[in-house]
Image (spheres, rainbow, N blue to C red):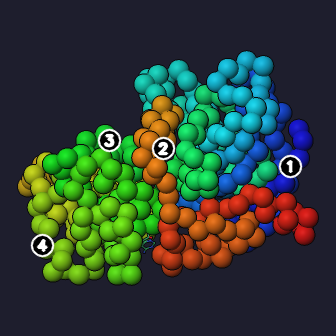
Amino acid sequence: MPLIHAYGTPSATTPLGPLDIERREPGAHDVKIAIRWCGVCHSDLHTVRNEWRNTLYPSVPGHEIVGEVVAVGNAVTRFRLGETVGVGCMVDSCQHCATCAAGEEQYCENGFTGTYNGRGQVNTWGGYSEHIVVREKFVLHIHHKPELLAAVAPLLCAGITTYSPLRHWHAGPGQKVGIVGLGGLGHMGVKIAHALGAHTVLFTTSPDKIADGKRFGADEVVISKDLAQMTQHKRSFDFILDTVAAAHDLDAYLNLLGHDGTLCLLGAPPTPHPAMSSSLLVGSRRQIAGSLIGGIRETQEMLDFCAERDIVCDIEKIAMADINTAYERMLKRDVKYRFVIDMATLNQTAKAA
Ligand code: NAP
Ligand code: ZN
């Protein structure tokens, strides 16, 4: 298999740097994509630092990929050379279990194949690389204007991960929806909940993000550390989407749900949340739920929904060599609101190394 340039790490404690990886040549059903832009998800950081204790090394993250089709297998029918396409968090699944049949490959009963960190003993390498080869079924069409493509990349994870639960729990007119955390996922949660017509309330720990939250479509912004502000919203929410990347007190949000309300967790912190109070659930038939990215069909639906409304992410473009600094800024909540790597800068680092 040919070697290509990538950026990754051989261990949890080594900063990311240039390395070479093998990529298969496209088979009959594969699309080969030259990667132009790759978003930086907090899951990339959790993975390269082995915070979920399942990382296969060397690790090359990146699952918010926008690029150009440069080769197609002879059975590929839905993509042509030169087309702009996207790849998100999955590159394959079993295709025969009940959830795959229902178009929810992210819940594949046999385990989907992640764009990076594969499954079991088989590693896969993600979008911090020159190109990727992906089964046609897992490649997405992009209909946004060409000048928006860098800001489209994070829709492939941050966009679908918030769109899917907002649709599943029927966010829309007449509903009061909370979004917790204004990072990559959270800012897309605010934009999408607003676009769906819900009364949208942002919860943030960062007072300097209030104006941005409102600009993204929040009707109200609550500083979650301020008990008086939190108490004003007691028992009033239909749905709260929690995107926080660290363990925190869930009771503070359960208290804000109305009867039959749902708190949906998206964050995957390395340590468990403190135990919640069951009386807060029992007393009002409230629910705690979770949600994982979204299926391929729904990801295409989300991309088209956003393209029709010119919805994209608010991004800061970075060069590949800036990735370690970007991770440190992410840990300080200093992301406005997604880093996106200009993959043209990868070859500069490869040559310098
Ligand atoms: P991010 O850009 O770093 O945003 C996380 C936000 O959480 C921060 O900006 C901050 O917002 C808030 N926060 C509050 N307390 C925090 C703390 N102690 N440490 C860090 N953040 C804190 O992360 P992301 O890319 O949106 O991802 C968020 C989480 O979702 C991660 O755990 C990620 O792995 C997970 N994730 C899950 C899925 C899924 O399918 N369920 C998909 C992708 C990512 P404020 O400043 O507004 O408080
Ligand atoms: Zn992600």
**Can I make out residue 163 in this image?**
yes
Crowding around mark 4 (Cα neighbors within 10 Å: few <14, some 14 to 19, many 20+) is few
Q: Count residues near mark 2 (Cα–Cα under 10 Å), then give few for <14, some for 14-19, many for 20+.
A: some
Pointer 4 residue: 232
Cα gap from disc 4 to disc 3, whole angstroms: 27 Å
**What's under tag 2, amino acid-wise?**
Ala
Sequence-earlier tag: 4 or 2:
4
Q: What element carries label 1?
A: strand
Residue ID for mark 3: 167
Amino acid type indicated by mark 1: Ile
User: Mark 4 is on which residue type?
Assistant: Gln
For the residue pair 332 and 107, the one nearer the viewer reads as 332
Find disc 2 in the rendering and name its residue.
Answer: 307
Which comes sooner in the sequence, label 1 or label 3?
Answer: 1
Quarter occupied by the N terminus: top right
Q: Residue sitting at 39 percent across and 71 percent down?
A: 212
* Residue located beneath label 1 in the image: 4
Measure the C-alpha gap from mark 2 to mark 3.
17 Å
For residue 316, side relative to residue 253 (left or right): right
Q: Is mark 4 on a helix, strand or loop?
A: loop
Q: Which of marks 4 and 3 is nearer the N terminus?
A: 3
Residue 327's spot in the image, x, y percent? 61, 71
